[in-house]
Image (cartoon, rainbow, N blue to C red):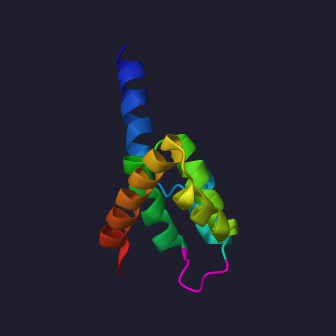
């Protein structure tokens, strides 16, 4: 039992201490692949961390798609579906939080 607890503690600690380059989330990956001048590993990682707290995995995938296709964001924003409206409300909060947390 002690070995299990030690292993679990070590695994949890490595998530915090070690850089997570290989485990980039969808938003971080899309950010890094984007052609935006300000995109760098530190900024994109910060944005992903905010996304991990404010958006679910489906919302993250949709938000990540906006990097490649900005018109899609406008389509979702203008959509008349309740699902898109709910997403957009969460996305706005995510954007505000990311702007506050990640400004350099």
Would you place residue 67 above or below residue 84 in this image?
below
Most frequent secondary structure within the magenta stretch: loop
Magenta-drawn stretch contains 36: yes
The C terminus sits in image quarter: bottom left
Q: Which portion, as a residue range, is magenta? A: 35-40
Q: Residue furthest left?
A: 100
In the current view of this chain or complex, which residue is farthest to the bottom? 37
Residue 25 visible, this orientation: no
Q: Quadrant of the N terminus?
A: top left
Quadrant of residue 75 within the rendered picture: bottom right
Number of dots carrying numbers: 0
Q: Residue at x 38, y 43 (%)?
A: 13
Residue in the foreground of this view, choosing between 6 and 96: 96
Q: Looking at the image, which residue sits at the far front?
A: 80
The image shows residue 64 at horizontal and vertical percentages of 60, 58
Query: Is 35 above or below relative to 14?
Result: below
Residue occupying the point 35% across, 58% down? 93
Identify the residue shown where x is 32% and y is 63%.
Answer: 97
Place of residue 49 in the rendered image (x, y in percent of width and height, measured from the top left): 42, 56
Across and down, in percent, residue 18 comes to 46, 54
Residue 63's quadrant in the figure?
A: bottom right
Answer whether residue 45 is visible to the viewer in this image.
yes
Residue at 30%, 71% (x, y): give it.
100
Using the image, determine if residue 81 lies above or below residue 45: above
Q: Residue 61, percent across and down? A: 60, 49
- Looking at the image, residue 1 sits to the left or right of residue 80; the answer is left
């Amino acid at each position: 039992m002690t070995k299990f607890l030690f292993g679990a503690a070590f695994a949890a600690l490595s998530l915090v201490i070690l850089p997570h380059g290989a485990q980039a989330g969808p938003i971080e990956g899309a950010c890094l692949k984007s052609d935006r001048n300000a995109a760098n590993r530190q900024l994109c990682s910060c944005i992903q961390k905010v996304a991990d707290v404010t958006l679910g995995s489906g919302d993250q995938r949709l938000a990540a798609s906006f990097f490649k296709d900005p018109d899609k964001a406008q389509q979702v924003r203008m959509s008349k579906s309740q699902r898109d409206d709910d997403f957009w409300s969460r996305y706005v909060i995510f954007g505000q939080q990311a702007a506050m947390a990640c400004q350099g």
